[in-house]
Amino acid sequence: MRIPHVSLLSFIFCYCFWIHHSVYYTGVSAQIVEDQQQSLLKLKNSLKFKTNKSTKLVSWNPSVDFCKWRGVACDEERQVTGLDLSGESIYGEFDNSSTLFTLQNLQILNLSDNNFSSEIPSGFNKLKNLTYLNLSHAGFVGQIPTEISYLARLVTLDISSVSYLYGQPLKLENIDLQMLVQNLTMLRQLYMDGVIVTTQGNKWSNALFKLVNLQELSMSNCNLSGPLDPSLTRLQYLSIIRLDLNNFSSPVPETFANFTNLTTLHLSSCELTGTFPEKIFQVATLSVVDLSFNYHLYGSLLEFPLNSPLQTLIVSGTNFSGGIPPSINNLGQLSILDLSNCHFNGTLPSSMSRLRELTYLDLSFNDFTGQIPSLNMSKNLTHLDFTRNGFTGSITYHFGGLRNLLQIDLQDNFLDGSLPSSLFSLPLLRSIRLSNNNFQDQLNKYSNISSSKLEVLDLSENDLNGSIPTDIFQLRSLNVLELSSNKLNGTLKLDVIHRLENLTTLGLSHNHLSIDTNFADVGLISSIPNMKIVQLASCNLTEFPSFLRNQSKITTLDLSSNNIQGSIPTWIWQLNSLVQLNLSHNLLSNLEGPVQNSSSNLSLLDLHDNHLQGKLQIFPVHATYLDYSSNNFSFTIPSDIGNFLSSTIFLSLSKNNLSGNIPQSLCSSSVLLVLDFSYNHLNGKIPECLTQSERLVVLNLQHNKFHGSIPDKFPVSCVLRTLDLNSNLLWGSIPKSLANCTSLEVLDLGNNQVDDGFPCFLKTISTLRVMVLRGNKFHGHVGCPYSNSTWYMLQIVDLSFNNFSGVLPKNCFKTWKAMMLDEDDDGSKFNHIGSQVLMFGGIYYQDSVTLTSKGLQMEFVKILTFLTSVDFSSNNFEGTIPEELMNFTRLHLLNLSDNALAGHIPSSIGNLKQLESLDLSSNHFDGEIPTQLANLNFLSYLNVSSNRLVGKIPVGNQLQTFDASSFVGNAELCGAPLIKNCSNETYGLPTSPHARPCTFGWNIIRVELGFVFGLALVIGPLLFWKQWRQWYWKRVDLILCRVFPQLNLEYESSGGHCYQVLRWRH
């Protein structure tokens, strides 16, 4: 067959063309490959990185095929398509000149976890084939470039950042979120955590609607605002939503239950409100829910669906309430359950014991009650926290099978019985905290305890007794040993702690222990571990433990409530790490030598209730809490004292012998919250700057000699809660600016010379609990008839020894709600009135008040919030007792004596079931004593003497136990305990005309006349001869002082006059 000439020529031409181009493309391809290798090497040389931490860049070697370099991925044509330089410790700038942008076939680029410290280059728009871009936590700062939005093929974009922590956040300002994602329609994963987004309202969610394929959205801490848009469900493929740490301030839309693919929902710390939709818990695919720290989010756990895939449920720090449903066991895959800091209550369902996959269980700070179910089937459990609930019962056999348990915390419950010995045999357990329960019995001896890995053992505040077993000191890994506030006894030689090489905290306070700090082997002192916290309060110590001298790292030392005598050693001030020192309630008398180089870190110093004397030398420059009260210090306050108190929050020098004025420099302490100079001999005027303070919470200057008027300088921003000026020489009126102190709880101006009317202008202070105005010159009517305000928290009112007049203020009584017992209130709230001093230190200032109780002046150092008292005695009140007063069903002390009150004692006085002391003496009450008075079972003091009461004293549980003096001065009152017997006559009416006439015995009359005449010879001069009267009573006082050594003659000023008075010394 003959081949045509044209066809042959065509074949030859095509063959040559193919050969030519094959050679050409092979050459070009080889050139491209070589160029890419050179680009990678140039990239490596241009980057700064730490070679000792690099595992990829440091291994790039030109002699090795670059496609085999770590972090480099190539396709079949040896084009670089993937580059992973994450975690290479790269630092320094990274800009558009980088050879990275010549690798235009890149599809995957990961530069995460580095520290470029520069803006994201705009050159990323050259990498148009990118489907995966990860720039997270790479140290990029500033604006996100528009060019990122040109990468239309992106499936995953991660630009998460923590640069905001260093003040240079990554921001989306020049372009908004909509511009960034408008071309990224193929995006399935978007991670922007920590990027500051300026888009406001729900515009940010509208911007995402073009991302119809989006499956994972993570925009935590992006400065997003609400409300959460219900239409987010248009993104129907979303399976992961992480929007933590934003400020939505809105409810969670119920439409979120329509996310049929939802697996993860993170909305922690988003200021969510309203009620969380229960249907969301029913989503069939949901495995992780975190709603924590949304304090205004309400909700409950109802029923969980069968075979739910839920693995993590966190609602801590919310307002979720109710109980845990029995269907909790439907969560067969549940691993993490955190319901802490909520309002859950009720008992735990027994079905919880079937949660086999649990690893983390936290139910702390709730109101759960009842017994704890056994958790032995949860063999993977590592963390268990039931702190601050109301759990009861024994836990002896509950945790023996938890071989993986690392931490157990059951503090602040009502658990009892013996401590479970099985806890000490758990091989991995690091921490046991069982403090503040009712565990009893002795600490047992534990076998194989030396192999334990236990680091924390806190059994404080229980009822444990017996001696401390020496086995505990075989716990070689122990860091914290806290056994304080139990009933442990015996003698413990402290040298045993040298075995605990890692011990940092030792707490043995408030037991019945005697601690022997003498070391049999002095050489062991050097082997005592360097502890940070040592608490040996109430341990019968008589001297400072010598081993403390070498504790250079100690931060907290408590040796209070011991019998340590003598001097405070100089070395204690040279413990440079010391932050808290408590030596209160000892017998210390002085300081050993001059105090120099005291620890600059000392923040809390408590020396109160010792016998320290002389001039006070210790004012640590950084101290926040200084208590020198109840000592014998005697000095004038230094004029420059304020220079040493720049950090002081609490300062008490009460019950010493201070004299002189309060210097102005004291006001330069700008952070001072509590100032207590009570019970001293200070004089002069109260500095105006003290009342001008906008920080001072407590000002207590009672029992001094301050004079003048109270400065009328209280600022509008006044935060004062306690103002106590009792027993000074103050005059004038109550300052009107005191009404600015709208947080005032305690006002005590008693025993001064204040001349004013009833302080109605203080009615706007709704927080007032204690008002003491006794022993002044107050006058006029009590009550505020034209005011609708109320002191509904008022619980102690003392207006005694003034010149008040008129009727008792029944309209005021209607508003004093704290005096009235609620139906569901048993009145047993044993909280104290006081001010928190250190918000995070748990230190409070406790107020005190002196009241007339049971006929005696008594000081209540801690004012219980349930203690209620009304004292209107020694005034000029008239009229009857109003029925409104009989509604004070919480009242404990009532004193209306020495007035001009009249009428019958109301029978409704039987309503005052809590009454302990009642004084109605020296009034004009008439009629019979109501029988209801006999039913007041708590009444331990009664005085109705000097009235016009008639009839028989009612027979009851209490009345016959009182002394006859309680009833004297009522001429027509009879019956026990009075000597006068009751007959059938009607008291106050004329006797029958048929009654037998009386005959007089003149012999008796003569004796009586002689007695009266003789008495007149003595009484007459006392009444009319001043010099004789003064001489007579002075002799009587001296005789009484000799008979009763406890009596002491003192001088007291009142009304501008000086009087000699007898006082009983304590």
Image (cartoon, helix red, strand yellow):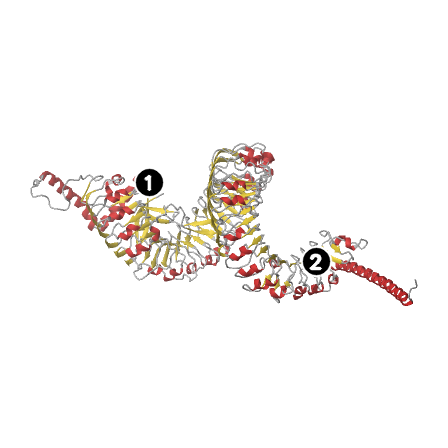
> Which structural element holds mark 1?
loop
Where residue 745 sits in the image (x, y, percent)? 39, 54
Q: Nearer the viewer, residue 556 or 381?
A: 381
Quick one: label 1, few (<14), some, or many (20+) residues within 10 Å?
few
Amino acid type indicated by mark 1: Pro
Q: Is residue 135 left or right of residue 765?
A: right
> Which structural element holds mark 2?
strand
Q: Is residue 279 above or below residue 588?
A: below
| Residue 963: quarter of image | top left
Q: Nearer the viewer, residue 582 or 926?
A: 926
The residue carrying mark 2 is 109
Where residue 36 sits in the image (x, y, percent)? 78, 60
Q: Is residue 802 above or below residue 441?
A: below
Q: Is residue 303 left or right of residue 46?
A: left
Q: How far is mark 1 from mark 2, CA to CA?
A: 94 Å
The residue carrying mark 1 is 1045
In this view of the protein, can residue 252 be seen by the observer? no
Which numbered mark, 1 or 2, is in the foreground of this view?
Answer: 2
Where residue 226 sits in the image (x, y, percent)? 53, 61
Q: Nearer the viewer, residue 398 or 838?
A: 398
